[in-house]
Amino acid sequence: MSATVELRGVSKRFGAVVAVDDVSLTVQAGEFLTLLGPSGCGKTTLLRMIAGFETPDRGAVLIGGADVTHLPPHRRDVNQVFQSYALFPHLSVRDNIAFGLRMQRAARADCEARVAEMIALVALNGCEDRKPHQLSGGQRQRVALARALAPRPAVLLLDEPLSALDAGLRQAMQLELKRLQRRVGTTFVLVTHDQAEALAMSDRVALVNRGRIEQVDRAAEIYDRPATAFAAEFIGQANVCEAEFIGRTEGGARLRVSGLGELRVPAAAWPGDALRAKIAIRPERIRLIAEQPATGTANAFPVRVDEEIFQGASDRLVLVTPGGVRLIATATNAGAGQGSVRAGESVWCVIHPADVVILS
Amino acid sequence: MNALAPTSAAALPAAPARALPGSTRWLLLAPLAVWLIAFVVAPALILVVYSFSERDELGRVVFTFTLENYARALDPVYLAVFGRSVGYAAVTTTICAVLAYPVAWTLAQARPPWRERLLVLVMIPFWTSFLIRTYAWITILKSEGLLNGLLLYTHTIAAPLELLYTPGAVVLGLVYAYLPFMILPIYGSAEKLDPALIEAAHDLGCGPWQSFACVVLPLTRPGLAAGVMMVFVPAIGMFAISDLMGGARVPLIGNVIQDQFVGQARDKPFGAALAVIFMLIFITAYWLWQRRAEARAA
């Protein structure tokens, strides 16, 4: 019912543009994997290679262990939900969903039963005889899903499936997609540029940038331990700075960040013989306190609040150190009576050594 | 466009078109109305009047009322000619459709600079008079023509083939003349087709033929229908090609009608009756087709 997808060193160029550059990736059977990246990063080309719409210049595509690199789309056990849905405008909802089954020459009774099952699955009862133009955006999205799932593909590909929906519906559909994937157990490969979508739905996220995969891991893992500056800044927000190694102390490594000062990190976090590296600090891991902390507290710096931006549940603060480094911090909106930080105030910021992420 | 920049009123999107006052609207339509009345309605009425008249020995029209012309039109001889005309037009239309699809499809898939260039190629034949192009075909096809010359020179054949003045030559001439009128409307429909629909069809298991039959054909049907109209209707009444390329051997209904008006037969009332019958058939066919289209849309 579900199958693995494997990309082995695939590359693809369009004219002078290298869309995909030597990418290897394995998607487990039954896994929900998201290809996340900015537009033009090559994620859609990767998806189209799995679907069969593009043939890699080099490398191989395997589905369920079988090499399908040169197999046309209609001979692959893979279906896609298109960004624009690509529903057949001349066919009813029922005929759209039955399309793939008819191409498989399924028996009429089986076909009808499967269509009814799909319509129930995506809760479109009563819309069977409507044409796509008579449906709302959300309903079209469901028809596209049902149509792609009806032939029981081993792998379902989703190309920005929620981008055409408004914000509220998008969140509801995120949950629904995830639930659906658990129910049918099919391998899902989703493409999106929306990190919230990736974090909400996927088992694992493959971060794509400039035709390469920067990091593949569980979303929380990428968030806590981003491998690169791109990963740190694309998933969530991060303060990324350049750090210089100055020595070791008991249980720690001492770094110097120009404009900020001396920063301690756990010894194990610092790569053996490196002299310089980029570091990342998540805004919500920067703790703000009004009073000067006790001497000996690691990573405490005086800062001035330059700007505060109200964001509802939290405030976004722009901090400036005496050395001129700007840091972004977030402060939870604790409610009335809780002293909040105002622009122009001078406070102390404290960063726990374990919250400093060393990037490669 | 900068969303914050003030926009001039003219740049604002789609202000609802203000209805023109009644008199102005009529004034704008007047030239068209005059044209239609002078060159479509009036001649058609003259034809109807002629069709119920008689002719004298000199071929002049004598205005009486008779159904004689219509009775004669139903003679098996003329029904056979009419049947043959429909047959030739149907074969022509079918061949045009089969040839036009790949061309229209290629045009629709071509990238912009090439698309315009290829479209010009489709239209280049119109830059030369239709009659001259038909005479060019005669030069190619006649016994001592270019094609026979080439085949003889290469020893493919021993004696010249009879190519001109055959039914095949007539169909060739008709297809050649009307192919662009099939390509352009199909291209118009194919160009609007979302390429993702074709990909979706492939994705759901369609081979090339199936995706053509299940997606491309149904979605370009309006273009095909327009093409059929623009080829079948004129082809059925065409007389120049059957005259020039078929000799007198394959007279079509157009030739018969032409003969009544300007040819040797000189029987305008009878020619008018044939033309009126012809028109009625088309109007009925069009009406039925339109009704079916409306029923399908509802």
Image (cartoon, coloured by chain):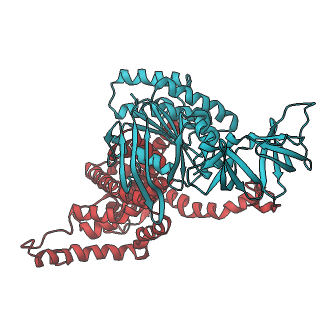
Q: Nearer the viewer, residue A318 or A27?
A: A318
Residue B36 % position (x, y) = 58, 60
Q: Is residue A131 above or below residue B263?
A: above
In the picture, residue B200 is in which quadrant? top left
Which quarter of the rendering shows the N terminus of chain A?
A: top left
Please tell me the colour of chain A. cyan
Residue under the point 56% across and 40% down: A161
Evaluate whether residue A36 shows in this view. Answer: yes
How far across and how far down the image is residue A332, in percent? 81, 35
Between residue A116 and residue B84, name the one nearer to us: A116
Q: Which residue is the extreme one toward the front?
A: A250
Chain B rendering hue: red
Place of residue A42 in the rendered image (x, y in percent of width and height, measured from the top left): 51, 53
What residue is at 31 percent from the left and 67 percent from the top? B241
Q: Is residue B279 visible?
A: no
**Residue A2 horizontal/vertical position (percent):** 40, 30
* Left or right placement of residue A83 versus residue B136 in this view: right
Q: Nearer the viewer, residue A65 or B204?
A: A65
Q: Quadrant of residue B134?
A: bottom left
| In the image: residue A266, left or right of residue B273 | right
- Residue A266's place in the image compared with A255, above or below, is above
Report whether A90 appears left or right of A235: left
Number of disc labels: 0
